[in-house]
């Protein structure tokens, strides 16, 4: 009997030991496999012709991994010395340690972003015998032979090792930004090149550009086909930009307050986006109609879209440099500062709410130029398609849904000022380049594709897509409005005909001031913590599906959106957990799923 119970204990011990070492090995293995796959894929694309960048890339990774391998070696030695490692009843502690480590890294990144630099970072306490528990450090050593504490210490030292943290910071703050800044300007050109020169097929594009030659040669060949901006394109883009600025100032609108910033500032905006949107669309269609007899057509923008993308790319890259320097030397508010890492500062921005001559930069780049540009471009696609093929129902569905979505956006523009793009993301390459180039280049890709690859859907399919898309737009809008309404009325409103379920969450600003926010835990916000992303993805699918399934290109935007929004659910949860602490935990307990009820 006794022997049986001993055997059981031994088996349980072994299972737990395997759990710790297994999950570590798995993590390690996955990391290496991903790196190996990236390198192999690049090498294959390159037909192994390449010489310098990949060994350099691998060298950099190995160099930054060096502390990590040293830590692992020490841990292995510890393991041999101390025997089996148990997580035992403290498995939840192990989880907490891991979570705390995640928060520490996030905190470190946050501090860097807030301009405290590396010196301002709090290093986790990794001194022997101390582990994190319930968010604090306390001694858990219970004397010699306590394999549990040794195991936890080893695990903690591994996950919190300075080497691993440095590696994470290097990946997040230097390598990823460099790769993104170098790669994404090419991405919009890939889309244009594929649609115009490869019948919308990415496979044809890859074989045309990269088969039997190096990546760099392929890229150079692609850029050779791109024309530099001609005078008409420069005039049109400059005129459009100036028009947007003038209208920001001149059009009537009441002044609205944005959310309070981490430094305690409250930015104020002129809420005239919807009037601007209606006026601009009216001008577009009016001029299109009036100038047609004289041979002028807006489809020049479609015909010379390579020039447009070239000009936008060049302008945005320089503009982001200007914003970077402005944030360092002439910031508009105290919500600014450097992380100490030039590359990250350029990528992420140095100011939250930069203003130039009283013009709010993000309001201009995100809304008045980017989102309005999206609406104008899909109208251009509709005109071009009509000129080439007459009425095509797939183009109609795609353009109609995009326009309804953008109309909703401008109707709710004041609410947009309380979203992550504005509250969290600084004005740098990430958001400003994204809105100035990515929106025109990627977001419009479904209707851009349909110009050269028209599809006839028939009434039933067209109506089904239209109705589903409109429903998704409505749900997305209602979810955004529920949050805005609850906060605007301090909870004195109804959500789905009932009193809203609320969590009154307290938090502290950087200047020590205490504040309170409402977290809505019913309505769409009671289904999942970011349920509104589901209709956002659905509606994007509805305006891509009219292209049917011949090519992947019209789904580029949806694929990008899924990645962006899933990543955002993690980013926002992390931000809110840091801001609201236990109040956020309460919300997570009440609404356990991130995005899709019962699934994710
Ligand atoms: P949210 O609108 O979800 O804003 C997130 C913020 O809302 C949180 O940081 C928090 O801010 C607050 N919040 C979180 N949970 C609650 C709650 N339960 N009750 C009240 N407030 C809460 O995120 P996004 O900015 O990502 O999205 C805004 C809109 O833009 C959505 O419609 C989205 O679909 C759309 N979108 C579109 C994209 C595109 O490319 N097409 C990309 C991203 C978004 P606080 O600090 O104030 O508490």
Image: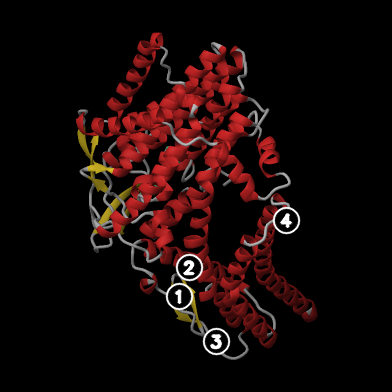
Crowd class of label 2 (few under 14; some 14 to 19; many from 20; radius 10 Å): some
Q: Position of residue 210 (x, y in %)?
A: 68, 44
Q: Are marks 2 and 1 in contact (CB under 8 Å)?
A: yes
Label 3, on which residue? 142
Q: How far apart are marks 1 and 4 (CA)?
A: 43 Å
Ligand 1 under 8 Å from disc 3 Cβ: no
Look at 41% across and 50% down and name the residue there: 429
Give the mark toward the camera: 3 or 1: 1
Whether pointer 1 and pointer 4 mark residues with C-beta atoms closer than 8 Å, the reply is no
Would you say the residues marked 4 and 3 are in contact, meaning their CB atoms lie under 8 Å apart?
A: no
Residue position for label 4: 48
Q: Kindly identify the residue that appears in the image at 33 percent across and 26 percent down.
A: 277
**Which residue is located at x 45 percent, y 56 percent?**
574
Q: In which quarter of the image is residue 331?
A: bottom left
* Label whose residue precedes the other's in the sequence (2 or 4): 4
Q: Quadrant of the N terminus?
A: bottom right
Q: How would you rate the neighbour count of disc 1 (Cα within 10 Å): few for under 14, some for 14-19, many for 20 or more?
A: some
Q: Name the residue under label 2.
A: 100
In front: label 2 or label 3: 2
- Which numbered mark, 4 or 3, is in the foreground of this view? 4
The quarter of the picture showing ligand 1: top left
Residue at far bottom of view: 144
Q: Which mark is residue 124?
A: 1
The nearer-to-camera label among 1 and 4 is: 4
Q: Measure the C-alpha gap from mark 2 to mark 1.
A: 9 Å
């Amino acid at each position: 009997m006794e022997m049986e119970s001993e055997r059981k204990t031994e088996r349980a011990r072994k299972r737990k030991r395997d759990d710790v070492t297994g999950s570590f090995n798995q993590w390690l293995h996955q990391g290496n496999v991903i790196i190996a796959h990236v390198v192999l894929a690049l090498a294959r694309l390159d037909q192994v012709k390449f010489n310098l960048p990949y060994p350099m890339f691998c060298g950099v990774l190995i160099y930054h991994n060096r502390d990590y391998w040293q830590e692992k070696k020490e841990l292995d030695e510890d393991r041999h010395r101390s025997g089996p490692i148990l997580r035992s009843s403290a498995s939840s502690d192990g989880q907490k340690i891991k979570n705390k480590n995640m928060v520490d890294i996030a905190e470190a990144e946050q501090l860097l972003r807030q301009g405290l630099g590396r010196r301002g970072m709090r290093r986790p306490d990794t001194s022997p015998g101390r582990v994190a528990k319930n968010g604090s450090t306390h001694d858990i050593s219970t004397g010699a032979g306590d394999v549990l504490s040794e195991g936890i210490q080893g695990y903690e030292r591994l996950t919190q090792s300075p080497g691993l943290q440095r590696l994470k910071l290097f990946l997040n703050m230097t390598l990823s930004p460099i790769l993104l800044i170098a790669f994404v300007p090419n991405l919009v050109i890939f889309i244009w090149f594929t649609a115009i020169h490869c019948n919308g097929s990415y496979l044809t594009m890859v074989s045309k550009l990269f088969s039997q030659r190096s990546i760099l040669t392929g890229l150079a060949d692609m850029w050779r086909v791109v024309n530099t901006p001609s005078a008409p394109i420069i005039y049109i883009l400059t005129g459009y930009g100036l028009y947007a600025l003038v209208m920001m100032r001149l059009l009537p609108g009441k002044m609205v307050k944005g959310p309070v910033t981490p430094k305690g500032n409250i930015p104020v905006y002129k809420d005239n986006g919807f009037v601007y949107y209606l006026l601009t669309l009216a001008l577009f269609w009016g001029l299109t109609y009036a100038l047609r007899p004289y041979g002028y057509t807006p489809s020049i923008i479609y015909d010379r879209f390579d020039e447009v993308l070239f000009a936008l790319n060049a302008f945005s890259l320089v503009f982001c440099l200007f914003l970077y320097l402005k944030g360092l030397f002439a910031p508009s508010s105290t919500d600014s500062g450097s992380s100490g890492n030039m590359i990250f500062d350029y990528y992420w921005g140095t100011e939250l709410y930069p203003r130039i001559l009283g013009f709010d930069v993000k309001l201009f780049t995100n809304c008045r130029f980017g989102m309005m540009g999206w609406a104008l471009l899909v109208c251009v696609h509709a005109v071009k398609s009509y000129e080439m093929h007459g009425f095509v129902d797939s183009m109609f569905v795609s353009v109609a849904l995009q326009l309804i979505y953008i109309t909703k956006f401008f109707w709710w523009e004041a609410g947009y000022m309380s979203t992550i793009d504005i509250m969290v993301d600084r004005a740098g390459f990430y958001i400003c380049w994204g809105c100035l180039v990515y929106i025109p280049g990627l977001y419009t890709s479904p209707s851009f594709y349909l110009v050269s690859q028209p599809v006839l859907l028939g009434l039933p399919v067209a109506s089904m897509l239209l109705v589903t898309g409109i429903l998704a737009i409505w749900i997305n809008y209602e979810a955004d409005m529920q949050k805005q309404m609850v906060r605007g009325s301090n909870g004195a409103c109804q959500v789905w005909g009932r009193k809203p379920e609320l969590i009154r969450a307290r938090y502290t600003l950087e200047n020590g001031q205490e504040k309170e926010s409402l977290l809505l835990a019913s309505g769409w916000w009671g289904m999942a913590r970011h349920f509104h992303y589901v209709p956002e993805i659905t509606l994007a699918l509805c305006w891509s599906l009219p292209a049917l399934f011949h090519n992947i290109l019209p789904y580029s935007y949806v694929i990008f959106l899924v990645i962006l929004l899933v990543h955002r659910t993690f980013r926002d949860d992390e931000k809110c957990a840091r801001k609201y602490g236990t109040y956020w935990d309460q919300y997570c307990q009440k609404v356990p799923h991130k995005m899709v009820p019962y699934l994710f």
